[in-house]
Image (cartoon, coloured by chain):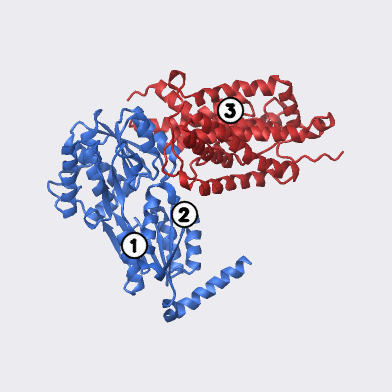
Chain colours: A blue, B red
Amino acid sequence: MKRRTLLGSAAALMAASTLPSFAQDEKLKIGFIYVGPVGDGGWTYQHDLARKAVEAEYGDKVETTFIESVPEGADAERALTQLALAGNKLIFATSFGFMDATVNVAKKFPDIKFEHATGYKRADNLATYDARFYEGRAVIGTIAGRMTKSNKIGYIGSFPIPEVVQGINSAYIHAKKVNPDVEMKVVWVYSWFDPAKEADAAAALIAEGVDVFMQHTDSTAPLAKAQEAGALGFGQASDMAAFAPSPRISSIVDNWAPYYIKRVGQVLDGSWQSQGVWLGIGDGEVVIGEITEAVPAEVKAEAEALKAQIASGEHHPFTGPLKKQDGSDWLAEGQKATDEELSGMNFYVEGITAPMPK
Amino acid sequence: MMIDPIAVFVLLLGAATPILFAALGELVVERAGVLNLGVEGMMIGGALAGFAAANATGSPAAGFVAAALAGAALSMIFALLTQFLLSNQVATGLALTLFGLGLTAMFGKPYEGVKAPPMMAGPLGLNLMIWLGLLMVPLVWWFLMRSRAGLVLRAVGENHDAAHGLGYPVRAVRIGAIAFGGAMAGLGGAYISIATVLQWTEGMTAGAGWIALAIVVFAQWNPWGALAGAWLFGGVTVLQLRLQAAGVAVPVQLLSMAPYLATIIVLVLISARQKFGRSGGGAAPGSLGRPFHALR
């Protein structure tokens, strides 16, 4: 029975791909795989908002489906294959760890277009898109540096991959700029979504004297912990406004909707091409959530000025002089980091004392 | 870079409490000869029910009562299937875990993003549930080892045919044990949602139920061992995060592996002891996981 449906859908797929004129009369089917549940209130929630925005924009012309809580690894390949066999013509794989699975499945289905978030492997039918989260980190790092009373700020990391390391460095550089005494504590939880562990990590940072922390994990558990302990934090990926005005004093929001709407439009009118884009605050993909009244007006103004400078391209968060953690030179005065350097970033900048995990 | 050992111990007690509750419950279930792999499902059921009730009433205590009831109710599905319909315990337990995760994902939607009411404070800055968890260890030990009812329960677990021959109600004892295990798992789950994470998120128990099962084996079916196991597992989690926060380079993977390695070593020790003829106490209950059907 299962094999029959499989063959059936495969046959339908072949029929659809050999008859493009016929396929155009039908809805464009779009599939999404998510690493967490849509109710995580963070990363996956934002991707799902963008999926809904696509539906709202194109109405009857598109039909979207999603598979949530897909583990990174072999299971992702199965989920992607399932979406491909179900007749989806455009598939969004929305986590870094889906990279190799997406590459493999894209190879098997050359007629289907794939979009992979935050990865770097591309093919003719596989595009990548990413957000310059580190630009947002610069802004909230500034706020954190100003708001800390203990001069200890914390960072809850997921996995030590370049995207997260950029965020830690960017936050530290900008916190240090406004508060030379600031110290950065880092805790890795080795998960994108594990509320209990994220809460424990927040508790560990607070016990270490940290009073303002940032997170690069997907749940709101650290903010709940911050509230209990009287510490401050930031919304991550999603606005997490339920915790405003305090402990959530601002947030970095991933706004995927404009990109998704644009790319779906390109598939509909046939102009879709594989590409790799990296969009930031200036493109509206990284949004700084409301800075609440818990933050003094002058700090808020300072953060917003920095945001404007980053948006206009006037300020690059990684501008020299900067040294690496081991004291070796990285960027000379006025020199800006290239995208290649950033996408492979595996070191801390000078001043961060936490060890980089191997 | 000094880490205050007392602060670590306080964090450890918090991290150990949910798995201690679940492990003590499962320990009693297994002592009665039943293997219920549905701990994770019952925990997540308790996590949601407890959170929902705590929110509706504003009282965490009401939340924990509801969590215990929800855990026990879920365990009754398992009891019905394995004790009356004699289904395979391993498969049924796994199904219960999957069922619990799915059911709570569905009914939990309205509670996403909602905050929990403040937790009940207790003496020495530890909340009341931590104290209750610690209190349950001697209580369970006393019940199993010193009370007549506990003796009957162990007899049922060691050899259900003999216990039946002596006239003990094997099925009733087991159903009671399963309900207790469910209630305890529910309490453990609710501790995660009400006291640790302070909110509801889908799949939030994240494997705590499986750790509880490992602890029961590690503990050699002894409540004091369960306490040691919960502290070991909870302690490793807390300590590695704490060491990281203090800026110490820790081999996280090695540390995370340590409790499981310890469990394997304990298993090896148990079988070595059995092999060399000294059948000391503490090995698995004789009828563990075997279905019971009264033929005569």
Q: Which of the pair B83/A73 is nearer the observer?
A: B83
Q: Determine whether label 1 and label 3 are within 8 Å by CB.
A: no
Does dot 3 land on a helix, a strand or a loop? helix
Q: Relative to residue A97, is residue B258 depicted above or below? A: above
Q: Image quarter for residue A139?
A: top left
- Judging by the rendered image, the residue that carries numbered circle 2 is A68
Q: Secondary structure at mark 1?
A: helix
Question: In the image, A17: left or right of B216?
Answer: left
Badge 2 element: loop
Identify which residue is drawn at 64% across, 39% down: B75
Indicate whether A256 appears above or below A175.
Answer: below
- Report crowding for label 3: few under 14, some 14 to 19, many 20 or more residues within 10 A (C-alpha): many
Cβ atoms at labels 1 and 2 below 8 Å apart: no
The label on residue B226 is 3
The amino acid type found where label 3 is placed reads Ala
Separation (CA) of disc 1 from disc 3: 51 Å
Mark 1, chain letter? Answer: A
The residue at 71%/20% (across/down) is B147
Which part of the image, by quadrant, shows the C terminus of chain B?
Answer: top right
